[in-house]
Amino acid sequence: MIKVAVDMMGSDLGPEELAKGVLDYLAEDKEMEVIAVGDESRLGLFKGNPRIEIVDTKEVLPMETSVVKFLRAKNSSMYKAIELVKEGKAQAVVTAGSTGGFLTGSTILLKNVEGVKRAGFCSPFPTLVKGKSAYILDIGASNVNTAEELVGFARLGKIYAELIGGIKNPSVYLLSNGVEEGKGLDESKQAYAVLKQQKDINFKGNTEARDSLSGEKDVIVSSGYPGNIFLKASEGMALMMQTLIKRAFKKNIFSKIGYLMTKSGIKEMKETMDYKKTGGAILLGINGVAIKTHGNSNAKFFYYSMKLANKMVRADIVNVIKKEFATNQE
Amino acid sequence: MIKVAVDMMGSDLGPEELAKGVLDYLAEDKEMEVIAVGDESRLGLFKGNPRIEIVDTKEVLPMETSVVKFLRAKNSSMYKAIELVKEGKAQAVVTAGSTGGFLTGSTILLKNVEGVKRAGFCSPFPTLVKGKSAYILDIGASNVNTAEELVGFARLGKIYAELIGGIKNPSVYLLSNGVEEGKGLDESKQAYAVLKQQKDINFKGNTEARDSLSGEKDVIVSSGYPGNIFLKASEGMALMMQTLIKRAFKKNIFSKIGYLMTKSGIKEMKETMDYKKTGGAILLGINGVAIKTHGNSNAKFFYYSMKLANKMVRADIVNVIKKEFATNQE
């Protein structure tokens, strides 16, 4: 039996919406139990469910949270949810709440795996190869990272792509502003030199942001700030293109009929681009499975988050990371 | 009469292809003359044209160019083209060659306008508002910029958006990883504090990469490295979406008919996204109009580059920048 602590209060859409996603997943997976942390009066859907334990709290961690604020918010749903993992009562935590708060809380309560200098937020991206993801980290846990941290990200990403992505000997790249070895920020150039020497990492050199989602590139390593720009520029352009496509189909009566005829292909495209199916961003390198979903997560998104939590716990990823970093001290 | 120095050797597609673009533009604009720098034996199309002077050279600046290499390449087409602006024989230079070489050469030969700490590459981006561009700088002249340089970019971008984009009192934003004032890299936070105080800059705060191309945001200021990631991530995702759309239309016989019915709308979308029409990236802040087009520029791209050069010279943008930086010493 797997136990997942779920912060029910973090989404803009409210705990009622998230509860639906949790129930959808539990209906499918009889081997999971949930500790739902949140306002019990809004979790009527969970009532009487033998696989759901409710930890009642109405306090929500504010979006902008400092370390001090987090430590004072011991009764917040996010604090309590992370704490359940710390105490060994749950193996994973899922939240849609404050990213900064989640990062602070996970780092303080769960702590980094020994040998991990810095935990990184990792997110799968859609690629041109159907069903294949690229894993990019860090997408915003830090702003600036050292070369040593970047090498750590490469190792974390490699493990994640192997265990969760199911990719054998995943290719690892550094995000840069040119493919040549001398390109990029100083820390990236230094990391390049170290990564070249790592026999257990299938390091392939630099990749430009333009060519990163071809499907042949499995793990893409970046400092947090440019990684975040990469994520959001890609998201923004994907949304913009979707809007432009909608406009094209709405242009006149012919294009409207054209849409009907193209519908099944368009549906496939939408599915490729559906970030809800990713299950969220994963904080890699801490002692516990920690998943952060969008602030406006709906039931579908949470369903996939539960699924991802299950996959990560079953793969025993935290222990794999521990072993890997115990034997590879950069 | 306007004179433009054109480096004919920089494009992968060869001088013959670029020559077509130059001729297309000259046919339309009788008030422009061109000094074409390149291999005369490949510029047969220009023969006998009274408005084209050929400066014959076969030497091409290599893609990877250091300052020393550039200074030694005095016979290269790019060196000579930039030199023509320095000597006052041309008012603008257009090239498809090495970005690094162009940056080095323009900075060394033409020098920054007094008061400009650092020149920035600026590029127009398509937005959701039809016909409206957002102007983003720096997209890669530097990697890391100081707060002072970012404030300079804001001013350069403002002038460009006004004079060339035709936008009155353009809104200016800092690219960041959050909209709150405290978000972003240190230099960006410092620039924020200074920009708030500038009465002549319509500074609106931070923008995230995701929301930058809505059409309401006119100038977006960034350090060079994340600006470059923004540019290339956007390009990459736009290309990916276009590939996915093509796939959707090719899915079956119905979708193929659907395409035919949607064609005019799709054409509009393609036009919105057509980077060839931008004319290239502009190096702002140096003593001369300097335009860098894609390394694989074709005739159409060069046609628009010539058009842009004309617009920038007619707007007397270099002198406007000089005046602005003489009166606003940050």
Image (cartoon, coloured by chain):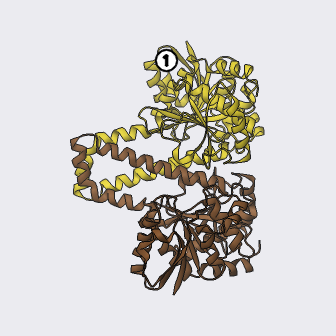
Chain colours: A brown, B yellow
Q: Which corner quadrant holds the C terminus of chain A?
A: bottom right
Which residue is found at the position 64% from the left and 32% from the top? B283
Q: Where's residue A177, x and y in %? A: 64, 49
Disc 1 designates what residue? B49
Q: Nearer the viewer, residue A43 or A181?
A: A43
Query: Residue furthest toward the top?
Result: B1
Q: Does B55 appear above or below A252?
A: above
Q: Does B87 appear above or below A330?
A: above
Which residue is found at the position 63% from the left and 19% from the top? B90
Residue A205 visible, this orientation: no
Q: Nearer the viewer, residue A65 or A208?
A: A65
SS at mark 1 in the image: loop
Q: Nearer the viewer, residue B287 or B149?
A: B149
**Dot 1 alpha-carbon crowd within 10 angstroms: few under 14, some 14 to 19, many 20 or more:** few
Left or right: where B298 falls relative to B284: left
Q: Nearer the viewer, residue B53 or B41?
A: B53
Which residue is found at the position 54% from the left and 24% from the top? B164
Q: Where's residue B94, x and y in %? A: 58, 29
Q: Does B187 appear above or below A329?
A: above
Q: How many marks?
A: 1
Residue B94 visible, this orientation: yes
Q: Where's residue A269, x and y in %? A: 37, 58
The chain holding disc 1 is B
Res. A45 image quadrant? bottom left
Res. B84 image quadrant? top right
Q: Does A72 appear above or below B105?
A: below
Task: Inspect the image, locate mark 1, and give the three-letter code of the amino acid beneath it.
Answer: Asn
Q: Where's residue A89, x and y in %? A: 60, 82
